[in-house]
Image (spheres, grey):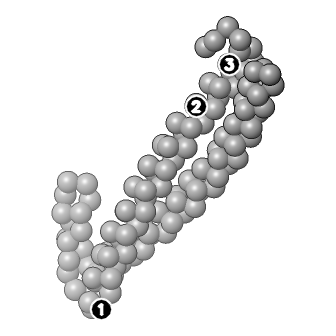
Amino acid sequence: MSKGISPQLEEKIKQYQSIQQKMAAFQQQIQALKMEQIEVEKALKEIDEMPDDEICYRSIGRLMVKSTIKESKEKLSDQKELADTRIKLSEKSSEKLKKQFEELEGTIKAALGTGQQ
């Protein structure tokens, strides 16, 4: 960094940058999970009115597997629940990081403000 910055302040700045990167990664993860959630909801909506014993195909990786509507609804509901849970956990983690980020930001600004006077 600079000659006028203490090693402790340098470390805080590094932590600040690291948290900033982690927050960006969480936001990308949350966005991807929300997209998955929307796709699952659309699929559930499409098959909602169909009879449970009707045959359909669902994707498992690169394979299409023969299934019933009932089985597909169950799998999609489980996927939706998992996505909901992962979104909530990611948002909580993101909020914790945001608090740490804001605290570090205040500490760095205070240290730089007193160092420049």
Q: In which quarter of the image is the C terminus?
A: top right
Residue 113 placement: quadrant = top right
Residue 78 image offset from top left, x and y in percent: 44, 69
Identify which residue, 51 or 107, lies in the foreground. Answer: 107
Q: Is mark 2 on a helix, strand or loop?
A: helix
Residue hosting label 1: 49
Residue 72 got which mark? none
Apparent side of residue 35 relative to residue 83 in the rendered image (left or right): left
Query: Upstream in the sequence, badge 2 or badge 1?
Result: 2
Residue 10 placement: quadrant = top right
Figure disc tally: 3
Q: Does any portion of residue 71 appear in the rendered image?
A: no
Residue 42 image offset from top left, x and y in percent: 32, 76
Amino acid type assigned to the residue bearing label 2 in the image: Ser
Q: In which quarter of the image is the N terminus?
A: top right
In the image, is residue 45 above or below residue 63?
below
Instruction: Work out how far the residue at label 2 is from the one at label 1, CA to CA, in angstroms.
Output: 48 Å
Nearer to us of marks 1 and 3 is 3
In the image, is residue 87 above or below residue 9?
below
Amino acid type assigned to the residue bearing label 3 in the image: Glu
Question: How many neighbours does mark 3 have within 10 angstroms: few (below 14), some (14-19), or many (20 or more)?
Answer: some
Question: How many neighbours does mark 1 have within 10 angstroms: few (below 14), some (14-19), or many (20 or more)?
Answer: few
Question: How many neighbours does mark 2 have within 10 angstroms: few (below 14), some (14-19), or many (20 or more)?
Answer: few
| Residue that appears at 54% across and 63% down | 85
Residue hosting label 2: 18
Amino acid type assigned to the residue bearing label 1 in the image: Glu
Q: Does any portion of residue 117 appear in the rendered image?
A: yes
Instruction: Work out how far the residue at label 2 is from the one at label 3, CA to CA, in angstroms.
Output: 12 Å
